[in-house]
Image (tube, rainbow, N blue to C red):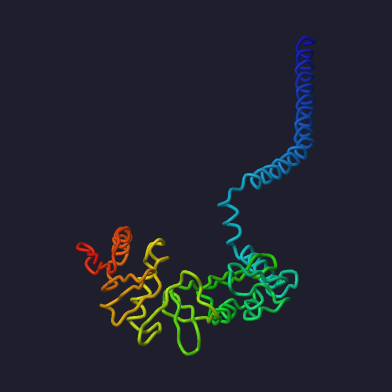
Amino acid sequence: MRSGRARRRSDAGVRSAHRTRGAGDTEARAGRRTGPVRSVRGRSVRARSRRDRQRRARRTPRTLLRDLLRPRGLAILLLAALTITAVLWYSPLLSVRSVEVVGVRELAEQDVLDAAGVTLGTPMLRLDTETVHGRIAELPRVAQVTVGRSWPSTAVLNVVEREPVVLLRDSDGLWLTDRTGLAYATVDEPPAGLPELKVSSPGPEDPATLAAVRVVDSLPDEVRSEVRSVSADSVHDIRLALSLGREVRWGEALDSERKGRVLAALLTQEGAVYDVASPDLPTIS
């Protein structure tokens, strides 16, 4: 009997010990859950923040473009564009402070500036280049002109002057005439090396004028220096008067460059009349 009671007491002690250990284990597990939960949550927040920073750092141009194309990004871009435009349009910091004239030879620079009429202080973007272009193009000596901007504050006027090809003599004096047949400026004395044009109705609309001018313009330099005048009774009958009383029968203005080369070779021989109307069969008489 004592042995049975002893066993029962022992079993009861064992069960009590198990209950005690079980309770302790439960509390320990609870303690482990309770304490580290806060730590895990903190680590999770920090990890997520770190990942966000890494994603932002790894953004590609495509990602940035996609962000900018969102409504908020578009609004920012539009605001920036409007701000920049307003600054360029109105700011005195980007206004015309100087005007540069390029390409003049016979023209006076001041004449170009006066014709251009550019007002200093005009905002660069508000500079009316077409109007300035039109004013300068009205100068008789100007063949071409371009008006541009050199940032931040310079207007550039690039001028190409007319080149005289022949000299026209009329009741008003001596006129420089360019390759378009336009008599654009008078001179007091005939410039050296410039042939005189002799036609019945000179002008840029006259076919004989244009044909004669085209012939002179095509001549090699060594031949042009010998020419004293060019006459054209019609587009089919062009003649050159050379130094020493020599004459050239040119015919039409067609194939003028080839005729010029043939004439250059013929002039190495003595003669009074050189006929290159047919460059395949030139003659000297």
Left or right: 195 as drawn, with respect to 75: left
User: Residue 103 sits in which quadrant?
Assistant: bottom right
Viewer-closest of 134 and 237: 237
Residue 154 placement, left or right of 186: right
Q: Is residue 277 left or right of residue 225?
A: left
Quarter of the image for residue 37 reads: top right
Q: Position of residue 207 (x, y in %)?
A: 33, 81
Task: Determine the image quadrant of residue 204.
Answer: bottom left
Considering only vertical position in the picture, is 106 above or below 221? Answer: below
Q: Say if 268 sits above or below 15 in the image.
A: below
Residue 174's spot in the image, x, y percent? Answer: 49, 82
Which quadrant would the N terminus be assigned to in this image?
Answer: top right
| Image point (58%, 72%), residue name | 106
**For this view, does 133 lie left or right of residue 38?**
left
Q: Residue furthest left?
A: 281
Placement of 138 over or under 282, stated as above or below: below
Q: Where does residue 54 sit, x and y in percent of width and height?
A: 66, 43
Viewer-closest of 51 and 56:
56
Q: Residue at x 50, y 81 (%)?
A: 184
